[in-house]
Amino acid sequence: MQPVNLRSFKLKVYHHQKAFKRFLGKLGKKPPKGLDKIAEQVNAEVWQEVDCLSCANCCKVMTPTFTNKDIKRIATHLEMSQQEFRDKWLYYDKKSKDWMNTTQPCQFLDLKSNMCSIYEVRPSDCAGFPHLAKKKMVDYMHVHQQNIQYCPATYKMVEKMMERVDL
């Protein structure tokens, strides 16, 4: 497994993002039979090739949404009240009605190791990211279209899907 080169990744995204988004759009409108099975196989292959710890781009440029359960769990872990946790680290987005990080990169990311300091209690949004192997891939096309620009694993998944699925 080779480490992710973010500069090279961003260049590839720049050149292929439109085609990848177009492919995912078509795939979502006319999914082939067995799409979820193909996605499951591709997911296993992707994680043999992509090392998240050499990247952590998601933690550097995105923010997870924090559910009330996440807030309670993390605040307890940090020995803070839920209100103290929200006041210190989060803001409430009125439009999306979500609690989100006030800073980027994520305050819990150790930039030297690319490791999460609250990994065992991280938000459910982080635990599921990048959502490659969801049971109904069709329901996540819009998520994949967004994540291609942030996540080398998502990019690699779309690359592999394009090799296997004729549209």
Image (tube, rainbow, N blue to C red):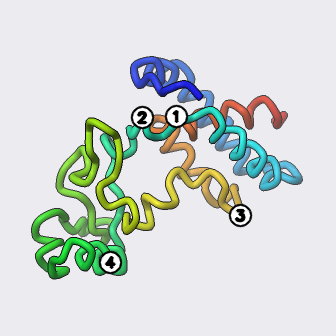
Q: Which residue is drawn at 52% across and 34% down?
A: 152
Residue linked to disc 3: 135
Q: Are marks 4 and 1 in contact (CB under 8 Å)?
A: no
Residue linked to disc 4: 73
Residue 5 percent location from the top left of the image: 44, 22
Q: Do the residues labelled 4 and 3 touch (CB within 8 Å)?
A: no
Residue linked to disc 1: 152
Residue density around tag 1, few if under 14, some if 14–19, many if 20 or more, within 10 Å: many
- The amino acid type of the residue labelled 3 equals Lys
Q: Earlier in the sequence, mark 2 or mark 4?
A: 2
- The amino acid type of the residue labelled 4 equals Arg
Residue density around tag 3, few if under 14, some if 14–19, many if 20 or more, within 10 Å: some
Q: Report the quarter where the C terminus lies.
A: top right
Residue linked to disc 2: 55
Mark-to-mark CA distance, 3 and 2: 26 Å
Mark-to-mark CA distance, 4 and 1: 29 Å
Q: Which of marks 3 and 1 is nearer the N terminus?
A: 3
